[in-house]
Amino acid sequence: MIMKIINLIFINLLITVILFILMFMLNNNYKLNWEKNSPYECGFNPSSKYRLPFSLHFFLISLLFLIFDVEISILIPMIITFNYNLMNQWMLSFLIITFILLMSIFYEWNKKLLSWIF
């Protein structure tokens, strides 16, 4: 049993290394570029000393993304673990989560936070 696991790990590592080497061999556009290799920090230039404040619109859009990302991580397991015996409890929790998300999107829409024009 342990030998099978060790063999699988070795095979996975071998495939990963082979694919990594092939990527570098076949990639003709691979050049060391400082701008491409520097980290992107929410629109800030990492090489400058002075940090300019970022727009509030960027912050609100990122929060909106996080809210709906968490929603998906809650609803997908709910759908997968659906059980007919607990139908009432499942439906109630599903409706509460969906209602909260709908109210939040309507609130953001009302406050004009979803407009993409600055």
Image (spheres, rainbow, N blue to C red):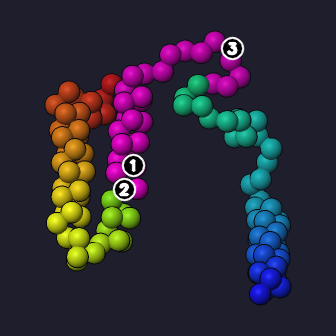
What are the residue bounds of the magenta stretch?
45-73
Residue at image coords 20%, 51%: 96
Say whether disc 2 or disc 3 marks the residue closer to the N-terminus. 3
Dominant secondary structure, magenta: helix
Left or right: where 11 falls relative to 82: right
Residue assigned mark 2: 74
Residue 78 visible in the displayed image? yes
Q: What's the residue at 77%, 59% (across, down)?
A: 28
Q: Which residue is mark 1?
A: 70
| Residue 47: in magenta span | yes
**Is 38 above or below relative to 118?**
below
> In terms of sequence position, does the residue under pointer 3 or pointer 1 come before the other?
3
Tell me if residue 106 comes above or below residue 72 in the rendering: above
Which three-letter amino acid code belongs to the residue tagged 1?
Val
Q: Amino acid at mark 3?
A: Lys
Q: Residues within 10 Å of mark 2 (few under 14, many from 20)?
A: few
| Tag 2: amino acid | Ile
Is residue 109 among what the camera can see? no
- Percent from the top left, x then y, of residue 68? 35, 47
Q: Secondary structure at mark 1?
A: helix
User: Tag 2's secondary structure?
Assistant: helix
Q: Which mark lies nearer to you, 2 or 3?
A: 2
Q: Quadrant of residue 14?
A: bottom right
**From mark 2 to mark 1, how far is it between C-alphas?**
6 Å
Residue drawn where x is 33% and y is 64% of the image: 78
The residue singled out by tag 3 in the image is 49
Q: Marks 1 and 2: in contact by CB < 8 Å?
A: yes
